[in-house]
């Protein structure tokens, strides 16, 4: 039996196990997907232990994505992002991927949103914002980054070709001329608040929220009320899992089955 899992702290409420278990069943793969809650002070030991025990692959969640980047040889495309959320333990050693980035792009494709030549605003400057900013740039978008601490937005923008950094006070003006606005902060996580001004939304925007608890965040409901297209955070969670499954198994992921398993647990 193959063994895969998610490593993080905390991980007890992760929605990845039912999603991946459903995919394994669909494909008739003899595998289990389990949770590993690691001690942050011993994370390198945990990664090496997983390798030594013959674990086939790991999903890496907070707060260990940078540690995973240092441990696993990153896929060439991922070097710029500086974070790894998927490890494939191969015969030649552990290889790191960032399916947060590729998964978000697949979520937009699934909703028939072509990012090429669009103006995309990323709100936030943390790990999720990095994945979104580099992903949007790879897709051909003009990236603008807005963050409460403007210096962090400028620092991230300096790493993303052609991107510009801004403070949150510029967000309304950025949204007026944007095509896509993506919330990569935790604002709205199990709370009825939004990082974006409600009166800044307009019908020509696409709104994406990385938060998936709740699915209908204030960020998205404000956007929908203005006629904007919305993409909830569960799509990013789904497609990062799809990317991990396909990386590990070499099989096409059963997207609808995984989506059904995921949403049944939300």
Image (cartoon, rainbow, N blue to C red):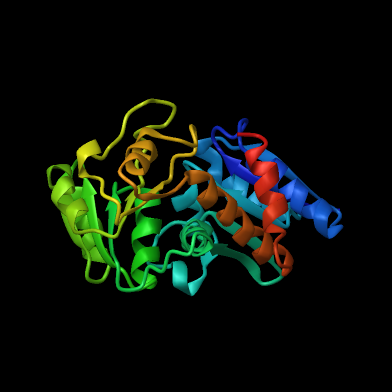
Q: Which sits in the foreground, 109 or 82?
A: 109
Nearer to the camera, 179 or 86: 179
Residue 35 makes an appearance in the image: yes
Q: How many marks?
A: 0
Return the x and y of residue 41 as percentages of the image width and height: 50, 37
The one of 158 and 213 positioned closer to us in this rendering: 213
| Residue at position x 73%, y 65% in the image | 249
Q: Which image quadrant is residue 13 in? A: top right
**145 to the left or right of 112:** left
Query: Residue 254's spot in the image, x, y percent?
Result: 72, 59
Quarter of the picture containing the C terminus is top right
Residue at the extreme top of the image, as rendered: 191
Q: Nearer the viewer, residue 43 or 153?
A: 153
Q: Please determine whether, in this image, residue 28 is positioned above or below residue 21.
A: below
- At a point 33% along the width and 60% down the height, the residue shown is 133
Residue 56 shown left or right of residue 169 in the figure: right
Question: What is the x, y in percent for residue 264?
Answer: 67, 37
| Relative to 12, residue 49 above or below | below
């Amino acid at each position: 039996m193959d063994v895969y899992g998610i490593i993080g702290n905390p991980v007890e409420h992760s929605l990845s196990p039912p999603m991946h278990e459903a995919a394994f069943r669909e494909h008739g793969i003899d595998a289990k997907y389990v949770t590993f809650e690691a001690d942050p002070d011993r994370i390198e030991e945990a990664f090496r232990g997983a390798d030594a025990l013959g674990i086939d692959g790991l999903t890496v969640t907070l707060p260990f994505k940078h540690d995973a980047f240092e441990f696993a040889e990153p896929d060439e495309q991922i070097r710029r992002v500086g974070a790894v959320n998927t490890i494939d333990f191969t015969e030649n050693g552990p290889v790191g991927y960032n399916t947060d980035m590729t998964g978000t792009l697949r979520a937009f494709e699934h909703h028939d949103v072509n990012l090429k030549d669009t103006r995309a605003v990323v709100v936030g400057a943390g790990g999720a914002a990095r994945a979104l900013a580099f992903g949007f740039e790879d897709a051909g978008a003009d990236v603008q980054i807005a963050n409460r601490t403007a210096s962090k937005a400028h620092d991230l923008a300096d790493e993303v070709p052609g991107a510009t950094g801004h403070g949150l006070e510029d967000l309304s003006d950025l949204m007026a001329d944007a095509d896509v606005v993506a919330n990569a902060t935790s604002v709205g996580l199990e709370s009825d608040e939004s990082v974006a001004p409600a009166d800044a939304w307009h019908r020509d925007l696409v709104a994406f929220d990385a938060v998936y608890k709740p699915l209908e965040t204030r960020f998205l409901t404000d956007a929908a009320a203005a006629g904007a297209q919305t993409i909830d955070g569960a799509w990013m969670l789904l497609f990062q899992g799809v990317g991990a499954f396909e990386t590990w198994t070499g099989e096409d992921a059963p997207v609808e089955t995984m989506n059904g398993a995921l949403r049944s647990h939300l």
